[in-house]
Each structure stands twice: as C-alpha cells, then as structure tokens.
C-alpha cells in the first residue's frame, strides 16, 4: 500500500470517510515523515506531534460515533508562523516575538480545524515575512527540497518546502507580494493567492493592520494537486466576522467566455527563455482544451507594482521600523535598506494620491478581466534564484525585485492569482501564473486542472 503521507488530500478524504484508514494512522505516518526529512529542511519550526495525534484520535472517536466527517477530516496541514494559533507563538520569524503566544486561533486556522484538518506543525518565514527567501535569526534557514542550492521561496518558504516533501498535504501561506505564489513556484507545487475578502484573517496578538496590509495581504493554500487547492480554499473561506473585509461570495461564479490573455513579458519585463517556453507550452495546452488564447496588451503591471511597494513600505515605516531596530536581523536590515531606495518616504498627500490611483488601476484591470477572464503570465521572470541571492549585493537585490514584477503587481488590485507547477528545467522547478477577476478563483482552478491534471511528484520521496 502507498505510504499514507504520500496521499493528496483529495485521495485521502474518501478513504477516511469510508473508514478504510484511520485518522491516527494517517497523522502518525506524516509525523514519521517529518522526523525523516524536516531536520534537513528546517521547514516546520514549531512541531506539535502530541497535539496532532491527540486531535487525530479524537477525530477517529467522532467517526466511530457516527459523526459526519468534515471536508478535510484527517488531512494533515501546516500553518505559517505569522498567524495566530492557540498556544503557539506568532513569531513571524522574530526573536522579539518568540514569547508572543496566541490565546485564540486566527480565522484561517479556526476554519481549517472546523473542516476537520489536523495541524501537524508551523512553518518558517523570513523575519517580518519580508523576502522571497526564508531565513531568520530565530528559526534559521529553510532548504528547498527540490535542490538545496535554490531558494525555497518566501515568505511562505517553509510551507512550500513542507508540501513538496510530504509533510502535510496542504500548506497555509500568506501573500502580499507573491509570498504564496513564489514559494510554490520555487518548490515545484501549486499555490493560490485568493481575492481580497475571500479568506478571513485577523491576528489578535498584533491587532489590525494599516491600510496597505488590509488591502493586499491574504491567506491561502499550497498543495500538490489543484483539487487539493479547491478543497482547502472552501475550508479557509468560511465565515468569520473578525475580518471586516470578508465577503460571503460563492465559490463558483457565472459562466464566462473561455478567453485567456497571453502576457509573456509585460511592460518590458525581462523574461528568461525557459520561462517563455513554459508559458508557450501552457498556452498551447489551454488552446487544445478549448480556450481562446490571444496575445493582448493588459493594463499596467509596473505602475501597480510601484503602488503596491509604496503602500507596503508606508505600512512598514509606520508600524515596523522600531521592531526592525529591536530585532536587528541582518537579512531584514539589508532588504529594508534596499526597499527604501526604491520607495522614498511618502507623505499624506502622496498616500491619498496613491489610493486614488489604485482605484483607477483596479477599474482598468476589472474592466479588462470582464473581456479577458484569465491572464496567463510569468510567476517570475527568472528560474528560482540561488538561495539568499537577494542579500548578495544591492545589484542582486534589484535584479530579484525586477523579476518579481507580475507577482507584486496583482495584490495592489486585490486580485487572485494561481501558480501552477508545470515541470522542471534541469534541477529548477518551473511554472506559470494565472490571474482572474475578484472572487473568480474558480476560473483559475479550472484552467489549472487543464495545465496540471495530475498531482506533482514529491521531493525527497
């Protein structure tokens, strides 16, 4: 029989519901897998073996009493250390938050538990969740299970590495500038950034965020199969009124024309040839499946990227600089210094004009997506970077920032985006990004299933 930790959530759920395997057997298998591979990866930095096995035993007892299983009953999931989980520190990769223990679950954790998921551990992030790489002075560095010389991505690099190596079928991540989509790309799995307002979020340990984070930061899933992303999204998106942005929107929208805007190198973006090749292969697959794929000029990416950075950095300057000094993490210090070169301090009139321009860009993008319901574009302009490349020099940082243009731009308008893993180029994972209108994750997932009809292979299997 297949080792249980290798099962996707979609494969596991019916086996649990039909009592062919027990939840405790499943979770015990995942714990053994964590024992085997996590020491080399440092993906899960807060283990919870006893709690996970106790929750599994309780789930089995409920099933034995005739309780109806939830949509994720028995599924092992990981949670990123930047969201609240009862009894654990919301470290966000910071030594200064090592004692910031949550007294209540954040909405996304509560929703996963209500769906029956079993949390097996908490995953690493860079300090302040500030990079597309994963290293901090508290938990250390995370290794990419596909190739240790490559970044596992960030900021949800721990989640990407956990999913790719079989330490849980679903990984929770957060995304304000590609922090779900890029680690999925770098680790060779799929990652969904939901729309603003789809998945409720709130951390009682730190309170409400400023406007940049409120408009752009979301939680979402990573997984090895597109059906697993669909299961996870449905669970994560359940009602929780602690988030004032949450909307009760259907998970499936109205039928629309199957039209895809092909955008290979927006706004003069430099795109490596292997990335272009992956995009062209994806376009051909979609076309063969009946989608109308055409190369068209989209609304601005670069202007949206610049606005996103201004909003993000304005929030960090207001709420984060004292914490930056107190933490004194070398990577975070360097990245912040480079970001300030690109984002001069913004005054109140500048902030007001930025928010005004955001409304215009959002209108342009949503009007475009009404005609072209899907956009196919790069996740990054380059193959996954060498690990820690962004802190090698200011010039290296600038090259990384430029390559991430499409990932950074999309959150500015609150749009959903999907990284689909499509294969590899030598040791390098490769994938493509799909973008849709607000609350049309269903369109992303349907197209994603065309591009990746089977689960991606496990790393270190």
Image: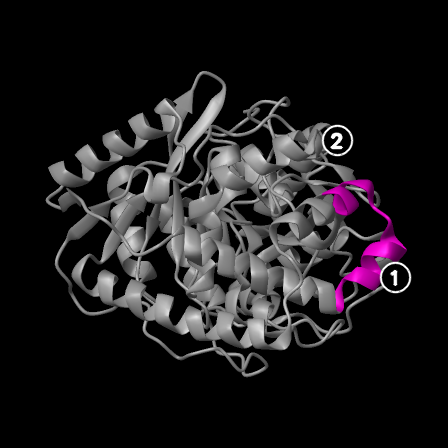
Residue at 49% over, 42% down? 404
Could you say which is closer to the camera, residue 81 or residue 397?
397
Relative placement, left or right, of 159 versus 289 is right
- Residue ID for mark 1: 99
Relative placement, left or right, of 194 versus 318 is left
Could you say which is closer to the camera, residue 374 or residue 189?
374
Mark 2 nearby-residue class (10 Å; few <14, some 14–19, many ≥20): few
Q: Magenta segment range?
A: 319-334
Mark 1 nearby-residue class (10 Å; few <14, some 14–19, many ≥20): few
Relative placement, left or right, of 74 versus 335 is left
Q: Which one is in front in this view, the residue at disc 1 or the one at disc 2?
A: 1
Residue at 32% over, 36% down? 454
Could you say which is closer to the camera, residue 3 or residue 266?
266
Q: Could you say which quadrant of the image residue 82 lies in?
A: bottom right
Against 322, residue 171 (above or below) is: above
Where is residue 207 shown, x and y percent of the image? Answer: 71, 76
Mark identifier at residue 39 = 2
Where is residue 211 shown, x and y percent of the image? Answer: 59, 74
- Taking the image as drawn, is residue 250 in sight? yes
Helix, strand or loop at mark 1: loop
Helix, strand or loop at mark 2: helix
Q: Could you say which quadrant of the image residue 321 lies in?
A: bottom right
- Taking the image as drawn, is residue 69 in sight? no
Taking the magenta stretch, the answer to whether it contains residue 321 is yes
Where is residue 315 shown, x and y percent of the image? Answer: 66, 67
C-alpha span from label 1 to label 2: 23 Å
Closer to the N terminus: mark 1 or mark 2?
2
Taking the magenta stretch, the answer to whether it contains residue 461 is no
Q: Could you say which quadrant of the image residue 183 lies in?
A: top right
**Total marks placed:** 2
């Amino acid at each position: 029989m297949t080792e249980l930790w290798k099962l996707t959530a979609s494969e596991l759920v019916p086996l649990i519901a039909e009592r062919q395997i027990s939840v405790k057997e499943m979770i015990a298998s995942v714990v053994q897998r964590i024992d085997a591979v996590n020491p080399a990866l440092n993906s899960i930095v807060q283990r919870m073996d006893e709690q996970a096995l106790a929750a599994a035993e309780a789930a089995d007892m409920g099933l034995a009493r005739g309780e109806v299983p939830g949509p994720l009953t028995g599924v092992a999931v990981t949670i990123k250390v930047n969201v609240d989980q009862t009894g654990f520190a919301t470290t966000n990769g910071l030594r200064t938050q090592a004692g910031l223990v949550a007294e209540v679950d954040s909405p996304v954790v509560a929703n996963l538990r209500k769906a029956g998921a079993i949390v097996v551990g908490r995953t690493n992030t860079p300090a302040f969740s500030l990079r597309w790489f994963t290293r901090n002075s508290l938990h250390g560095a995370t290794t990419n299970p596909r190739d240790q010389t490559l970044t596992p991505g960030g900021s949800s690099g721990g989640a990407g590495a956990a999913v790719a190596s079989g330490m849980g079928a679903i990984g929770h991540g957060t995304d304000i500038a590609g922090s779900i989509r890029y680690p999925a790309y770098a680790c060779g799995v799929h990652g969904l950034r939901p729309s603003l307002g789809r998945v409720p979020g709130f951390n009682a340990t730190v309170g409400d965020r400023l406007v940049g984070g409120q408009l752009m930061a979301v939680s979402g899933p990573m997984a090895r199969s597109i059906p697993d992303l669909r299961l996870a999204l449905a669970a994560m998106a359940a009602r929780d009124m602690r988030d004032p942005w949450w909307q009760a929107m259907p998970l499936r929208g109205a039928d629309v024309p199957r039209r895809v805007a092909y955008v290979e190198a927006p706004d003069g973006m430099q795109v490596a040839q292997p990335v272009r090749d992956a995009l062209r292969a994806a376009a051909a697959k979609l076309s063969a499946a009946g989608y109308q794929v055409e190369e068209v000029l989209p609304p601005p990416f670069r202007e949206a990227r610049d606005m996103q950075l201004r909003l993000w950095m304005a929030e960090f300057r207001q709420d984060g600089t004292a914490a930056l000094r107190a933490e004194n993490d070398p990577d975070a210090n360097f990245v912040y210094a480079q970001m300030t070169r690109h984002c001069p301090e913004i005054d109140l009139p500048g902030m007001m004009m930025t928010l005004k321009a955001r409304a215009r860009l959002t209108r342009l993008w949503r009007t475009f997506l009404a005609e072209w319901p899907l956009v196919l574009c790069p996740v990054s302009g380059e193959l996954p970077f060498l690990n820690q490349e962004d802190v090698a020099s200011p010039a290296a940082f600038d090259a990384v920032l430029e390559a991430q243009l499409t990932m950074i731009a999309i959150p500015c308008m609150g749009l959903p985006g999907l990284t689909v893993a499509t294969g590899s180029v030598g040791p390098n994972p490769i994938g493509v990004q799909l973008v849709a209108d607000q609350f049309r994750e269903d369109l992303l997932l349907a197209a994603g299933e065309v591009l990746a009809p089977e689960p991606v292979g496990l790393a270190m299997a």
